[in-house]
Image (cartoon, rainbow, N blue to C red):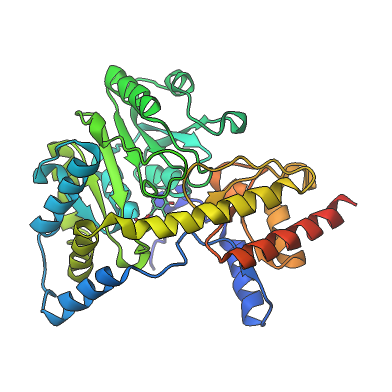
Amino acid sequence: MPRGMAERMGRLSPSATMEVRRRTEELLRAGVDVIDLGPGEPDFGTPEPVRRAGVAAIEGGCTGYTQAGGIPELRAAIAARYRRDYRVSYAVEEVVVAAGAKQALFSLALALFDEGDEVLIPAPYWVTYPEVARLCGAEPVLVPTDPTDGFHLSPAALEERVTPRTKAVIVNSPCNPTGALLAPEELEAIVELAARHDFYAIFDEAYEAIVYERGPFSAAPLKDEHVIVVGSLSKSHAMPGWRIGWVLGPREVIRAVLTVQSHSITHPASISQYAALAALEGAWDVVDPMVAEFRARRDLVVEALRKIPGIDCPVPEGTFYVFPDVSAYLGGDSAALARALLEGAHVAVVPGEAFGGRGHIRISFTRPRERLAEAISRIAATLEGLHG
Ligand SMILES: Cc1ncc(COP(=O)(O)O)c(C=O)c1O
């Protein structure tokens, strides 16, 4: 008789977004015109030169195993990109290619976190951080951020929660779901704190390229033994399905990630690595039209949401999400509100509870402008009914 699931599975929570997803798919299958503002991926295709490089890799027979840390040319191209854009020098041994930022974070957690360690996580947070910490036996310690302050992380709030068991902080800038972008001096303050208390500062920069008025900013130039930077091509080059990300960090951390990787995924797919090489060596201006379109959509969505009574919508400085405060409706139960919007407006959004941000919803502007305008006017009509 099998003895069931591992004890660690009891530490994981099922995704708070699952119910909305299930119902969205059910409605779509029934032919209902649902506008799905849930997805966390660009609605653009991968740029053509990158797609062609993938095809060439298949045709050229680049289909065997590669080194666990990735093909040396790609590791070098990642280092070159940071040298060019941020004037910081990482050796190839300080870079590892991963199968996306998520897998990079998972390998890092396995490499760094022990039972009983504490991991500081600013809230609202990306859903995976607390789960990945728990999976490795560590305890997530949430650090609240303030919407009136644009959800910026205060070093004082972070320091208040540091204990001798603090192993790391995971900082996400620009942040999914809030869109907050930390300035270089804020990144510096976090690194200074990590150095003083001797814990790792892990910077998840998956959205680094999707920024509007300021930036891009990276923590990579703050390179020291506490700094770990995670990057990805999923958002910048509309490549989520290719699964390419990376970690920059101290050599011993990179060696440990490499060991975890070599015994788990072996390496990211060879074909994707050659496509990623083309993305990194190619002109970064392929990103510009996407960012320009996202900026126009952001402005449209923020302006339309702000016209709805009771909604407060901070302007995101990066990412393709807005995270409005909808607590004036249904007593701040945003899970109930997301259900009401799906049933009443046929618009799918993600409830803030999924990100530790009750009273908010996450709206992803990864749809054409006319669909977004239609979605917000449907939301407005449904909310008016809820008020009355
Ligand atoms: C904050 C954040 N980090 C990492 C990822 C994962 O990116 P990747 O596709 O590179 O695994 C996502 C994807 O949504 C994200 O929102």
Q: How many labels does the image show?
A: 0
| Relative to 264, residue 225 above or below | above
Q: Please tell me which residue lies in front, 84 or 99.
A: 84
Q: In which quarter of the image is the N terminus?
A: bottom left
Res 188 → quadrant: top left
Residue that protrudes farthest toward the right in the picture: 388
Give the residue drawn at x 65%, y 42%.
313
Residue at figure coordinates x 14%, y 40% from the top left: 90
Please indicate whether residue 220 sits to the left or right of residue 358 in the image. left
Q: In screen coordinates, is 33 left or right of 319?
A: right
Q: Is residue 41 visible?
A: yes
Q: Is residue 233 visible?
A: no
At which x and y percent is residue 185? Answer: 37, 24
Q: Nearer the viewer, residue 232 or 284?
A: 284
Q: Residue at x 54, y 51 (%)?
A: 321
The image shows residue 317 at horizontal and vertical percentages of 50, 41
Q: Which of 344 and 19 is in front in this view?
A: 344
Q: What residue is shown at x 55% (from left), y 65% (from top)?
A: 367
Residue 83, given in percent of the width and then of the height, sits at 17, 41
Query: Whole-percent x and y of residue 347?
Result: 67, 64
* 271 is higher (above) or lower (below) than 3: below
Occupied quadrant, residue 332: top right
